[in-house]
Amino acid sequence: MPDQSIQRPLPNHATTTDYDSDIQFSIVVPVKNEGANIDLMLGLIDSACNGRVFEAIFVDDGSTDSTPAKLQAALLQYDWLRVLRHSQSGGQSAAIHSGVQSARAFKICTLDGDGQNPPSEIPRLVDAMDSHDGSKIHLVAGQRMVRHDTLSKRLASRIANAVRQAILKDSTRDTGCGHKAFDRDAFLELPYFNNMHRYLPALFSAYGGRVVHIDVVHETRNAGQSNYNNLQRGLVGIHDLIGLKWLIKRHKQVHPIEVRKHD
């Protein structure tokens, strides 16, 4: 697809921060009640990205456990860490969107805050955005090779992925993987809605972006428990698929060209 199809100036309301050309990438980590995993995640990110110039933005989505205190203390230890906090929970997509809006790098990398997306994959994801043929890659979507989840969760995910693939035809085996790297400007051009983070390959493709997939490692949850159950995912997923299918079908892409006066 033509590269310029998604490379348009950001609307005025989307830009909430200035870019810093010295920062190679921004990591956005949405967290809610992950106090038992914060120290582990910070240590793993520090090790994985050693030698790189980066920032990590942890977005606390209204946690009620030790997460705020852990992040507050960590600000004194890691100079690359930034912390945002939602006064009330807005959901994972809202947390990711807040983090991306605040990011100061052109490249964004996301991962879940429960330790199941190992930070050791971050350099691979970010580096995969630099294509060898000179064309721009807008989204690198991770796909989990071996799922370390309960049987019921794996089965529910398999069914959900099959249904989504049949409806959206997004050529993605595992859209629920939190490991992703993408172009900040292109992401902020996409329509925002709750749970949009689960459909980024379909959205980027529909809006003219180039999407590639890479296999990534998946780990068992270090501590705590998921904020979602299979029934919640299933019911919300059906509603989202119907809405997203309509949105993509109605999308019309046009590119204005300014008319200048002749001398």
Image (cartoon, rainbow, N blue to C red):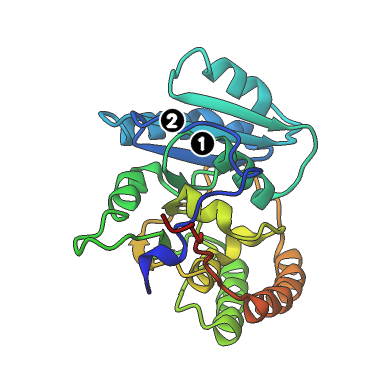
* Residue 23 image position (x, y, % from top left): 37, 31
- From what the image shows, is residue 8 above or below residue 159? above
Q: Which residue is mark 1?
A: 103
* Residue 187 image position (x, y, % from top left): 53, 54
What residue appears at the point 44 percent right and 18 percent down from the top-left corner?
79
Q: Which residue is mark 2?
A: 55
* Residue 152 image position (x, y, % from top left): 62, 70
Give the image quarter of residue 17. top right
Q: Which circle, 1 or 2, is nearer the viewer?
A: 1
For disc 2, the neighbor class at 10 Å (few under 14, some 14 to 19, many from 20) is many
Closest to the observer: 181 or 231? Answer: 181
Amino acid at pointer 2: Glu
Query: Quick one: SS at disc 1?
Result: loop
Q: Is residue 258 left or right of residue 263?
A: right
Q: Which mark is residue 195?
A: none
Q: Are marks 1 and 2 in contact (CB under 8 Å)?
A: yes
Q: Looking at the image, is mark 1 or mark 2 earlier in the sequence?
A: 2
Q: Is residue 203 left or right of residue 53?
A: right
Spatial CA span between label 1 and label 2: 8 Å
What residue appears at the point 59 percent right and 79 percent down from the top-left corner?
164
- From what the image shows, is residue 244 above or below residue 4? below
Amino acid at pointer 1: Ala
- From what the image shows, is residue 18 above or below residue 260? above
